[in-house]
Amino acid sequence: SAVISQKPSRDICQRGTSLTIQCQVDSQVTMMFWYRQQPGQSLTLIATANQGSEATYESGFVIDKFPISRPNLTFSTLTVSNMSPEDSSIYLCSVASSTGTSLYEQYFGPGTRLTVT
Amino acid sequence: QKEVEQNSGPLSVPEGAIASLNCTYSDRVSQSFFWYRQYSGKSPELIMSIYSNGDKEDGRFTAQLNKANQYVSLLIRDSQPSDSATYLCAGVPYNFNKFYFGSGTKLNVKP
């Protein structure tokens, strides 16, 4: 499975500011995703990061608030813009790689714990 | 109907027993299924994937897929306190464009 790292692992930010989270994978992967997970809740998909094109956002998430970049097949960033306390959450990067039989498995990075004050 | 549904639990089993976790899915999610384990404060960890009808065994874990009745199960034999975690079920549609997650089932294994 791919080795995924995220930076920062945690941060405390003031409302109105922005934070960029980086996700680095040790091998080229087809798909990269960004999720949010509130404490005690399940995963909520924010968007699919597409290499060389605009990300595909889920309902309720917009590019102005969560701009995403994916310049190549091993790296992506998620920016949380104009933060409010409601953005406090764990943000997870994940990648999906082929099992070699045209099927995919998804693996998660360690997450970024964001607190907005 | 949500694409993937799970009972949130908690499910409590004594140490050494079999823990049975279940998940149902809609017609939108029918290609492949996955079980993730998530310890508190950690990210989800893939423990089992299953693509075909029937059972798939890996150590103490057995995944079962029943496409006719649209459910997938995870059995954990000889449950240990270290198995206490939230278990997430996920599925993908035929075009593999995203993964749909259930809300997770919290498992408590009591010593």
Image: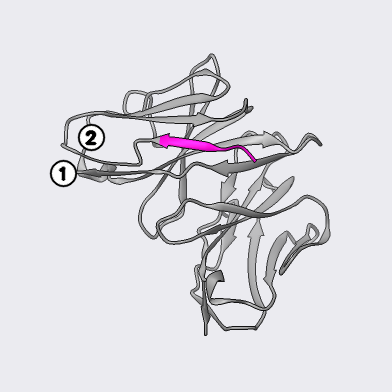
Q: How many marks?
A: 2
**Left or right placement of residue A108 versus residue A81 in this view:** right
Q: Who's the residue at 52% across and 37% down the image?
A: A4
Seen in the picture, residue B46 relative to A83 is either above or below; the reply is: below
- SS at mark 2? loop
Q: Is residue B7 something that shows in the picture?
A: yes
Q: Which residue is mark 1?
A: A117
Residue furthest top as drawn: A52
In percent of width and height, residue A80 lies at: 31, 31
In percent of width and height, residue A8 lies at: 34, 36
Q: Which residue is mark 2?
A: A83
- SS at mark 1? loop
In percent of width and height, residue A42 lies at: 46, 54
Q: Is residue B106 something that shows in the picture?
A: no
Seen in the picture, residue B1 relative to B28 is either above or below; the reply is: below
Q: Confirm whether the magenta stretch covers residue A2.
A: yes
Seen in the picture, residue A113 relative to A31 is either above or below; the reply is: below
Quadrant in which the N terminus of chain B appears: bottom right
Do the numbered discs 1 and 2 sit on residues whose CB atoms are within 8 Å?
Answer: no
Q: Which is closer to the viewer, label 1 or label 2?
A: 1
Q: Which quarter of the picture shows residue A83?
A: top left
Q: Confirm whether the magenta stretch covers residue B14.
A: no
Question: Label 2 amino acid?
Answer: Met
Q: Provide the residue span drawn in magenta.
A: A1-6
Q: Who's the residue at 71% across and 62% down the image?
A: B71
Q: Callout 2: residue from which chain?
A: A
The span from disc 1 to disc 2 (Cα, nearest Å) is 9 Å
Seen in the picture, residue A71 relative to A34 is either above or below; the reply is: above
Q: Which quarter of the picture shows residue A84?
A: top left
